[in-house]
Amino acid sequence: MSYKNTHKFPAGESETVEFKTSFNAEAIETLVAFANAKGGSVYVGITDDAGVVGVSLGKEATAGWVNEIRNKTAPCIIPDVEIIEKDAKTVVVLSVPEYPVKPVSFKGRYYKRTGNSNQLLSLSEVVNLHLQTINSSWDAYLDTVHSPDDISLDKVQSAIEVMKSNGLTISETPMLFLQKYDLLRDGKLTNAAYLLFKDKDSFTTTIELGRFQDTITIKDTARTKTDILTQIEQVLDFVRKHINKRVIITGEARNTQKWQYPLEAIREIVINMIIHRDYRAASDSIVKIFDNKMEFYNPGQLPEEISVEDLLSNNYKSTPRNKLIADFCKDMRLIEKYGSGIGRIVDYFKQDGLPIPDFKNISGGFQVTVYGKEYDGKTPDNIPLITEGERKVLELIQNNNFIKREKIAESLGISINTVKTFMSGLKKKGVLERVGNNKTGYWKISFQIAISPQSSPQSSPQSSKC
């Protein structure tokens, strides 16, 4: 305890300063919040608006305060005490540093300083704070529910083969390989091992997928509940199925294709969504596809110390929620390095002349919304939009522009009437033109078309499950 008259008095409350007119339970709560954050000081004898009212100190008063703080906190904290004179009145300053092993509680409740107020922490936030303190993460803990019998060693071997193709030298058996990556300890699975290689579907990894005509009308749905490595391709397959693709017919053996969204960016979003998901949360990951946008929602918000602005400016230190999974996926070359994905996503969209995706915390999770060009009959570049069936007809015509309708029907396994319907649609869209008469003439096609996913004259809303 010390007495000072030269103390630099703060102008107001802040992330590390709080004023109290008297010592009470709220003062202890604030000290706990400081200990769980960056440390701070409680000024007893000051009003909220920085007015000095002072306190009357009896014999051993501050010693009693310190003892009460120690008895009501766990782990117990013991503040430094300073008694200062301000405007001829006595003010007591109780100060605590950031506590090394978090979190600290007050009467069984946990608080953290955010701005100039105390935030009551949820159970998951308490766990996260502790894991960050010991430089660990939930996925590195042992799975108390599942055993090695619940994972597929064939899936482990497949991951090994991928790593070998990436140039890594691996000679271990699947079980030894799991031990090497700390996915298996003392014969027990970690949470990461189960998520990466589980043998059977389970609700733990559920991702809901939907193609929407509008905000309430669903045209197609799917659900995946398998291991997270398999889910990456399943989600990407669903996305590719339901977004538009432009085909530039060049006359060469291969046609040039351009998707409605940059697929490299979409892959980056999906991988980050799956790797960094909070798998302890009760909610599911959700992907919604609309005509001109897609939404990717994931349980688990950004860390408190990282804002969306920090993400976009790359002004942050990456702290993966699932460190073991992230490290493993890095060796599989699914991710390049921690913290670089957002920048690449933004660059891909800029290169395609599309709006920068929207990133935000929402409803206990994190959502990325991407915007593409809306295709409605014609593309923004005035390129006709055709169906998959019409595309197949055009491919046959491209190879033989004298081909007859009967031959097209036979090749595609459809009726003559369906071929006529396809050709009629192509003519109306200005893609297909008949030159000469029906007997000796030939077909002429334009050089650019855009393909509409999952559409044909017979198409209708449908539902499916992965």
Image (cartoon, rainbow, N blue to C red):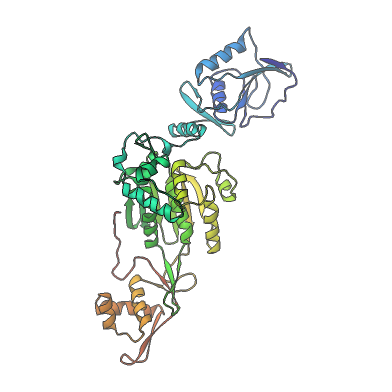
Q: 61 above or below 370?
A: above
Q: Residue furthest top?
A: 59
Q: Residue at x 63, y 8 (%)?
A: 58
Position in image of residue 213 (x %, y %): 37, 60
For the question of whether residue 51 can be seen, the reply is yes
Q: 332 above or below 92?
A: below
Position in image of residue 200 (x %, y %): 29, 46
Position in image of residue 219 (x %, y %): 33, 59
9 left or right, relative to 32 = right
Quarter-wise, where is residue 267 in the image? bottom left
Quarter-wise, where is residue 402 in the image? bottom left
Callout count: 0
Q: Nearer the viewer, residue 78 or 297?
A: 78
> Where does the N terminus fall, quadrant-wise?
top right
Q: Residue at x 28, y 75 (%)?
A: 412
Q: Residue at x 48, y 51 (%)?
A: 335
